[in-house]
Amino acid sequence: MTTRQRDRTKDNGYQKLFIKKLLRYLPHHLLLAITHKVRLRYAEKLLGSTAQKRIITTKTLRRFSSSEIAEYQKLTQDTQFWHGTGRWQHGERGTINVLKSFCDTGGLKPARDVYAVFGGSDQHIIHSISLCRSRMVARSYADMHGLGWKEKNRYGDALTWTSYYYSLFYARLFTVSGITMLRRWKTWRSLSHDEHGDNTWGKKVNRQARDVWDIFCLGSDIPGNYPILIGVKELASQVELEKPMRYYEVRADRLIAITNISHIEVPYDKQEEVHAVLLAHNIALPVTSIELGECVSAKKSFTELLGWSP
């Protein structure tokens, strides 16, 4: 057995763990979705409380004052969408300074996106910005640029949030339009995997990533990398996605300008660094900590954390 084969067998444990957690959470997610749709508020609240006690396990959260919490709530009151990224990413020509690119571009720029095929895109590959209505899920995407599911001061780890969130998505994906989605799955696989059978998406933050969900456990292999979470107030334009994808993700097909961004969240000890980079590019955006966002999120209902409307 070659070294590469040994690595792949080992890394597949994360993919299997994701599937195991996904199947475990699916019944709860389905019941919660039903009670939310038919407005059985008591049952919805009970299911939400159960999830927060038994699914979203948290050891410790950093503490903040009431004034800091109030300031965060004011800062995010107009935030509709979230985008998770990081300080650095691997590129074809070396390491990319994502924060500098953000500043040079004047916002979030559309990038190559092969996942839009699941949303019914006529084009196999489009350029878009992936966003989410759930802060917790977007934060999970940000965390893969740091320590992945090992990040501290989190209200639930990255793998737990993504496996719960996408459990009903995958169930809907293949039961509502099974044949169509199977064809799209084959198209997606041909676009997203290399000659070795590795999914290339996660390699932007960790060269050892082999499958989509590996990266939420592995975290980044780039020295000094850390998560960055960006709040977005509104979109100038977005891709029209089909069911069920449009319930879980949003795709912007144009630049999201600085004026449409509410704030940036980074690790507590990286706030000054990020603020200095922004000021050096004459960008005046509020910078706060992910830890503060987690503290505030812990006080919200479970359905709010999923990004569901009342």
Image: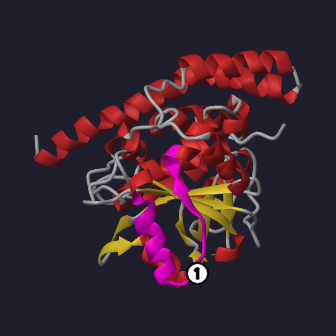
Q: Residue at x 73, y 63 (%)?
A: 233
Q: Is residue 48 magenta?
A: no
| Quarter of the view holding residue 46 | top right
- Amino acid type at circle 1 is Gly
Say if residue 257 shows up in the picture: no
Q: Nearer the viewer, residue 213 or 132?
A: 132
Residue identifier under label 1: 106
Label 1 residue SS:
loop
Q: Is residue 278 magenta?
A: yes
Magenta segment boundaries in residue numbering: 270-291
Image coordinates for residue 132, horizontal then vertical, percent: 65, 52
Q: Residues within 10 Å of mark 1 (few under 14, many from 20)?
A: some
- Reply above or below: 211 against 223: above
Image coordinates for residue 196, horizontal then vertical, percent: 28, 55
Q: Quadrant of the image for the N terminus? A: top left
Q: Residue at x 42, y 42 (%)?
A: 213
- Reply above or below: 207 against 53: below
Display coloring: secondary structure
| Quarter of the view holding residue 273 | bottom left
Q: Quadrant of the image for the C terminus? A: top right
Q: Residue at x 57, y 23 (%)?
A: 25
